[in-house]
Amino acid sequence: MFKKKLHMPLYLIAAILFGIKTYIVYRFIFNISLDNVMQELILFINPFATAFFIFMIGIWFKERRQKKYIKYIMLIGSLIIYFNIVFYRNFSDFITIPLLFQGSNAADLGSSVLGLIKPWDILLFSDVIIIWILAKKYGEKLVNPFKKRYKVVALALSIAFLLGNYALAEIERPQLLQRTFDREYLVKNIGLFSYHIYDAVLHSKSKAQRALADGNQLTDIKNYIDDETTPDEKSDLFGIAKDKNVIFISLESLQSFVINNTVNGEEVTPFLNDLIDDSYYFENFYHQTAQGKTSDSEFIVENSLYPSPRGAVYFTHAQNDFHSLPEILGNNGYNSNVFHANNKSFWNRDVMYENTGYDKFFDVNSYDVNEENSVGWGLKDKEFFSQSMKYLNELPQPFYSKFITLTNHYPFDLEQEDATIEKYDSNSRTLNQYFQTVRYMDEAVEQFFNQLKESGLYEDSIIVLMGDHYGISDFHKKAMSTYLDKEYTDYQHIQLQRVPFYIHIPGEEGKVMSEIAGQVDVKPTLLHLLGMDTSNDLSFGTDLFVDDRKPFVALRDGSFITDDYVYTKDQCYDRETGELIEEETNDETEVEGSACGPYVEQVEKELSYSDEIIFGDLFRFYDFKDK
Ligand code: GP9
Ligand code: MN
């Protein structure tokens, strides 16, 4: 069929097929936003430049090896893309190296992952199948020994392609590799494979950072914190909860959009809606988590630092010196403990909790877990709270107790007998089920409040409730936009990162707080309510009850929210209306002149200060003076 010399060599066929596939994936599976023709061009060039380079290497091998190389690279490359796709479907993000080391978590994720695999995904391997068949049938004809000159020219050409690609990317987004909080930008501009290589470089760099660090960096950071995040005055509520127990409830995957909302005409969260009336309820409170999910939310809340840009601090830096909420409370006579009916090593919690000053972790072994009382990820929330009461009643007071719920976790499975409202009806099974598990969690929390009242603990405690992170990812944007009856824009995406945050102080009336707020603010807020001085702490949050607040809430990818604006993906929106203020460009001067401009750099600076603290383990050089 193929005449000698007149056919296309296998490596080129592979590069073209693989390039086409990668482009289709970038364009239609990864939801990469393209704002201008240049970005479209880069996204088009990149898959082919990368594929050409990778497969060209094959021609430097002898025939048999060449065939093998092309076949296996095709397979491995496709698997890398596919793993990213599966990950992306749940997290709208790309895999990072630290995540791969969290192997222990992968097993627990099992049931969730199945829901992310689709039968038609097999089509994503068509190019692999074609190449393997071609190699088998026409191998000898398609794989040639190439002349030295040919090889050198091909090598030079492919490097030129790649460099051209990077040059265009650098023009499109100056300092691309220095400003890398947003992985989508990296993938968009240099492609998935170069991104993975770059990620590996970052990984080894951050490893080295601890060794190179000394205390000097802290001076700038301390000055920044004194100037920007530390208010001069105390709030009126300072000390209002002195010596009270703190009961912190982490509400799995709960987003604010369900609060005071309905599904099929029924209230989704009747108890949480009523709770607003006698609590401080923050309606513009954003989660700031990244790849570490629940563990990130725990980290942010207790340390008032940002989560890691890659992986989870709970895994990557669990041995650092921290100055965490449980430790500070411990130094002030509190007993700190966590209740969570999951394996103690999940998210490396046992190590992190020990290190951050918890006295006790009531993990899965403290609970009676069986088939009847569990669903999805484990013990059902109602059972979880009920079984926790006997331990809670025995604790020395005052205590700080954190309860981490579980039932409202993706894929939001619930048994029929526990479902008290109807599912939603849309093309997203995930969203349809979400409302039911949210309602279940609402009932579980109500039951817990009653149990606290019965036990007498209620009066002596303040109860803090917080959604840990989003539950519905961008993957369900169509269903979400139908439910919300709004177009799902980048602005809308940021607004959906709001999670409920309540501070319930028995005997206090509370108030709906509309100011912008975030998880980094929780630590100083709680410490102040308990009447503890934080002037020597290093934290990026501000007490939510003072007037003189930091003017923005930063998200991990560099997006931020101010009183007036929402900034994301180089665009500045009016916070109230969602209207685009003006087209941002990469021209620094223009960005600075814009509405959001003044904060762009400050947010980046604040995020990198937080990273410096974590990667350099800088707190080992600082005396917090609270002992
Ligand atoms: C499991 C709980 C949920 O222990 O933390 O994990 P998540 O996926 O939300 O981080
Ligand atoms: Mn979670």
Image (cartoon, rainbow, N blue to C red):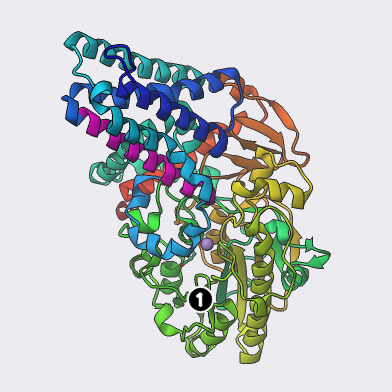
Which quarter of the figure is the C terminus placed in?
Answer: bottom left
Residue 459: x and y in percent read 65, 84
Q: Residue at x 37, y 23 (%)?
A: 13
Residue 574: x and y in percent read 73, 36
Residue 333: x and y in percent read 44, 78
Q: Residues within 10 Å of mark 1 (few under 14, many from 20)?
A: many
Compared to residue 92, the image places residue 239 above or below, namely below
Q: Residue at x 35, y 37 (%)?
A: 77
Label 1's element? strand
Q: Which residues are magenta?
A: 66-91
Compared across the picture, whether 255 is left or right of 170 comes to right
Q: Residue at x 75, y 34 (%)?
A: 579
In terms of image quadrants, where is residue 133? Answer: top left
Main SS of the magenta part reads: helix
Compared to residue 388, the image places residue 617 above or below, namely above
Q: Is residue 534 visible?
A: no
Q: Pointer 1: what residue?
A: 401
Q: Residue at x 64, y 42 (%)?
A: 561
Q: Amino acid at mark 1?
A: Ser
Q: Closer to the camera, 77 or 3?
A: 3
Q: Closer to the camera, 146 or 56?
A: 146
Which quarter of the figure is the N terminus placed in?
Answer: top left
Compared across the picture, whether 508 is left or right of 306 comes to right
Compared across the picture, whether 489 is left or right of 53 comes to right
How many labels, in total? 1
Q: Closer to the camera, 557 or 477?
A: 477
Residue 286: x and y in percent read 62, 52
Magenta segment includes 86: yes
Magenta segment includes 84: yes
Compared across the picture, whether 543 is left or right of 537 comes to right
Compared to residue 234, the image places residue 351 above or below, namely below
Q: Is residue 105 visible?
A: yes
